[in-house]
Image (cartoon, rainbow, N blue to C red):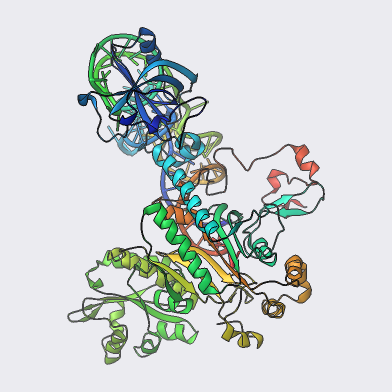
Amino acid sequence: MSLSASWRTHACGELRAEHAGERVTLCGWVSNRRDHGGVSFVDLRDRYGDIQLTADETASEEIRQSLTRLHPEYVLQIEGVVRLRDAEYRTKGRDSGDIEIVPERVTVVTKASRLPFEIVDDLDVPEEMRMKYRYLDMRRAPVAKRLMLRSKANHALRCTLIAEQFVEIETPMLTKSTPEGARDYLVPNRRQPNSWYALPQSPQLFKQLSMVGGMDRYFQIARCMRDEDLRADRQPEFTQLDLEMSFVDEEDVYALVERVMANLYQEMQSEALQTPFERIPYAESVARFASDKPDLRNPLEVVDLAGPATTIGFSIFESVLEKGGWVRGVRVPAGASLSRKQIDSIEAAAKDAGAGGAAWCKVGPDGPTGPLSRFLKSDEGSAFLASAAAVEGDLLVTIADRPRRAMVALDAVRRRAADLMDLVKGPDRLVWVTEFPLFEETDDGEWTPAHHPFTYPVEEDIAALKAGGREGIRSRAYDLVLNGVELGSGSIRIHNAELQRDIFTAIGLDAAEAERRFAFLLEAFRYGPPPHAGFAIGLDRLYALMFDAETIREVIAFPKTSVGGCPLTGAPSDVDLSQVEELGLLLAPSSDLEDADSHIN
RNA sequence: GGGGAUGUGGCGCAAUUGGUUAGCGUACCAGACUGUCGAUCUGGUGGUUGCGAGUUCGAGUCUCGUCAUCCUCGCCA
């Protein structure tokens, strides 16, 4: 590796004691200067590190002058000699602390105006400011480091997959809108007014078409766009490691992804990842952890209290069960030590998650105490506690609600309680969550694909599917979950036209409608589609975890704000009217955007 | 679409119950200084308190609206 180029012989940050005596030409940014009159110092920085330039009594007047005229972030080209510092002048804890440069020529290449903030590694700059001036922010070592780590990680992924005979295929960014899933970003089209491209939510369809094309192992580090509201771990455009394989079953995909992840960890953290990863079927995950993305470091589990709940005379439990709801709880071993305030915060977490409340009790030496305890004084109450395996010193938190809401609340209770008891620790836990439901019910009672409509059902559930079943039909879809964070998902795809029709029927798409929406895919599947399956890993989230970043914005070079704006360029922005006219579009008057209908009168 | 938090020189903070010319640190600029490495010392520049209304003799402070950023619910197959 050489960083030598026309303007420099070395990078500032690569010089070490071994270079002592060499004549070098360096380029970099002035990061700091310390002027003592007779002797002055300037630190010159690039992304590899920094190096001290020293002008002492041996320096010419011209050199001393030129160093004192420098300002922060000027770009310099300097020529000089690397000198080993005298022992007393060496700096511990600085990579180049044993050496300094004796400059013989100093050229200011470009000057810099006063900066919006200082380029200091540990300075607490508001994120808004950092992102607006991201190009300055990334001169700071920790920021630069994360960008370089990301590059290295991407490279490691490519190396593994290329070695596994995968082909990297770039799929279109201007593609067709599909009404399923997230809202599309639409791109108007000049040549065909009233027709639109959509930016891809994922390369899903193209990678399946690549399988039909015989590219039996495809991958791509792909940008995906979804026009939905954002969160700390969600950006409007994000990056996936997308892959697809032909002639494989789940085991092949699991093994491949495990090799990819293990090599990544090996390369990035010199850490052997335990493989194969753990596995848990969706139904078991929901039953035990009230989540489809369980954090297995959290030892707390959910207990089903439906049976004993009807015997203790608590009417809320009974009415919830009558309506088909859940009565389940989380036993917190030794949780009786928690304060009232802490338990209130558990209940608050449940309420935030949508539950009406969280009835709880402590098991004390003289029996249960707390809000739920008045129903537990009887033999039935003891049986209730026994069914939760609650013993003296424990806390039992119960949730009674509609299944979906109860699950979310139990998950919140489990997380909060484990947090309070400091139970979440130990090594990373990667787990495959398998056999997701094929369908899920929407608010208006419709059934939609839980993953996407090309997901293969579990073999033994196909009969039920063909008989018109929806609920409980399992799919061959799987998620990869790390410490409670969903890293990626995938599935075995349908390659059988008849089965595909059954799925479309099940979600209420008749043949004509299915044809209209997915004509190109269905046609492709008439020409000999291979059995295939795939997976996609969200790299922003994975990297944020691996690099210990607070948010995914920290691992994205130029992230967007929580309303999808680009702090640097100001996008999205208005455009010239002529551009809009050329597209055959009409602009809504800005005052009418809010309520177009009410304007008509 | 809903809820919450924040907003005072470039940055971090302060300003009694509403009360004088909005103060301090840092950065920046200038000068001094022979070994610093977040140098030090002296001096200086820099603010329509996010924006707009309102209440008041008087608003950084109170009220309403609005904008921006962040968090969150819905949403994200």
Left or right, residue A133 beside residue A48: right
Q: Is residue A523 visible?
A: yes
Q: Residue furthest left?
A: A365
Question: In the rendered image of this protein, does residue A355 appear above or below residue B64?
Answer: below
Residue positioned 18% across, 81% down in the render:
A366
Residue A69, position as x, y percentages in the image: 40, 14
Question: In the rendered image of this protein, does residue A459 appear above or below residue A345?
Answer: below
Residue A263, position as x, y percentages in the image: 44, 58
Question: In the rendered image of this protein, does residue A512 appear above or below residue A599?
Answer: below
Residue positioned 79% across, 73% down in the render:
A512
Q: In terms of image quadrants, where is residue A204?
A: bottom right
Q: Is residue A402 visible?
A: no
Q: Residue furthest top?
A: A61
Left or right, residue A458 beside residue A200: left
Question: In the rendered image of this protein, does residue A208 appear above or below residue A5?
Answer: below
How many numbered marks are there? Answer: 0
Residue A15, position as x, y percentages in the image: 36, 30
Of A133 and A406, the residue lying toward us: A133
Of A247 and B27, the residue lying toward us: A247
Residue positioned 37% across, 73% down in the render:
A358
Residue A388, position as x, y percentages in the image: 31, 83
Of A241 and A69, the residue lying toward us: A241
The N terminus of chain A: image quadrant:
top left
Left or right, residue A142 beside residue A91: right
